[in-house]
Amino acid sequence: MPSVWSGFQFLGGDPSLTSRDGAANAVLLGAGLIVLTTAINMAGVKAMACVNDIGVMAELGGVVLLIAALFLHAVRGPGVVLEPVYGPPSSLGTGAAGLLAAALMPAYVLYGFDSAGALAEETQNPRRIIPRAILKAIVASGIGGALLILAALMAAPSLTDGRLATEGLAHVVVSALGPTLGKVFLVDVALAVCVCTLAIQTGASRLAFSMARDGALPCAPALSRVSARTKTPVAPAIVVGALACGMLVVNYGEAQLFVLITETAVLLVNLSYLLVTAGMLARRLRGWPGRSGAAAGVFSLGRAGLALNVAAVAWGAALIANIAWPRHDGGGPAWLEYFPLIGVAGATVAGLGLFAAMQRPREEAKAPRGEQGAVAEQETGPARIDLLT
């Protein structure tokens, strides 16, 4: 946004995210965006769907036009993706090391598609619609993202002056297309970021709501309450927004730590995907879905399901190993190498502790013991006991 208009630089004068001023300003803008998406979440499903539809159409249209514009302003051919970059000394090139580094990019981009599943209860015929929506999102994002990267590399003024690393796509767009047209596209990019934030926050809040409804989170009664006016879970949206704003503060003057937290988050997400795909593979190997196949009107991968499932498990395991593998560049303390692993271990311990703490009262409610249970049944009646169970 500061690249669009200098008035968005509310703090300091340096917009670079690696500077203290740029990081602090990004925290302020990011927090403002989260406040906005939280308000939209609280407004109701119709308002959220309207904003999402407008944003997605603008995003798709903008991506197509931007790719075409960058290709028209190319200064080098598509072979740039196979050429070594002669800049500062690096162990990365066009070989295996470069390929492994490049493989991290889709891990940061092609995830979050499960947000469609989080809205299953608010979707008509979800078992047919949602899998197709997920596939369309992955295909569109993959093709569009690959073409955009290719077009940007072909149109970038320089690949070795360091500005690609610090200013990214905004630098390429403004430099190649000029300040006026370039800023128009940057506005569209900012709108796309807003829509993505809204989608991820919505998915996270619905996940928190469903877990609270099952009694798996603290403060479950408050988090599982649905607003009578908007028909949406308000408290989870507020909690998720507040936690996200808290995470943003880490970015203040600590760009390296923020990158490590992002790596940890992506590692956790891909680990959760692996748990799902591995569990489904185990079920397939035991004969699911059987000779009859999926029920009528339900999405199915058919005979390709097993092969794709095996590929998904293998890819997920390799991706997790690639993200978590310690890489020491000699520029910081050694513990930074293991930060993603430390983060995953900490989240796992915290999650298991929370699970155990929340399971204990649920088990006690399911199985009243001795005279206390008999008294409870006499006082409340079998219906109350069934409800607790």
Image (spheres, rainbow, N blue to C red):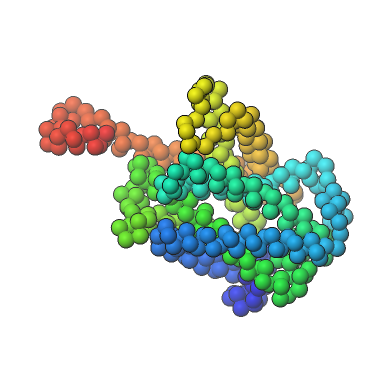
Of residues 372 and 30, the one nearer the viewer is 30
Q: Is residue 242 above or below residue 304?
A: below
Is residue 265 visible in the rendered image? The answer is no
The residue at 82%/51% (across/down) is 81
Provide residue 64's location: percent of width, then percent of height. Answer: 69, 60
Provide residue 43's location: percent of width, then percent of height. Answer: 40, 63
Residue pushed farthest left? 378
Q: Quadrant of the N terminus?
A: bottom right
Of residues 310 and 133, the one nearer the viewer is 133
Is residue 9 visible in the rendered image? The answer is yes
Q: Is residue 13 left or right of residue 157?
A: left
The residue at 47%/40% (across/down) is 127
Q: Quadrant of the C terminus?
A: top left
Provide residue 248's location: percent of width, then percent of height. Answer: 54, 60
Q: Is residue 26 left or right of residue 123?
A: right
| Figure quadrant of residue 15 | bottom right
Q: Is residue 22 above or below residue 321?
A: below
The residue at 37%/39% (across/down) is 357
Count the labels in the image.
Answer: 0
Provide residue 370's location: percent of width, then percent of height. Answer: 18, 26
The residue at 64%/47% (across/down) is 139
Of residues 96 and 42, the one nearer the viewer is 42
Q: Is residue 182 left or right of residue 227?
A: right
Residue pushed farthest bottom? 7
Q: Is residue 100 above or below residue 292?
A: below
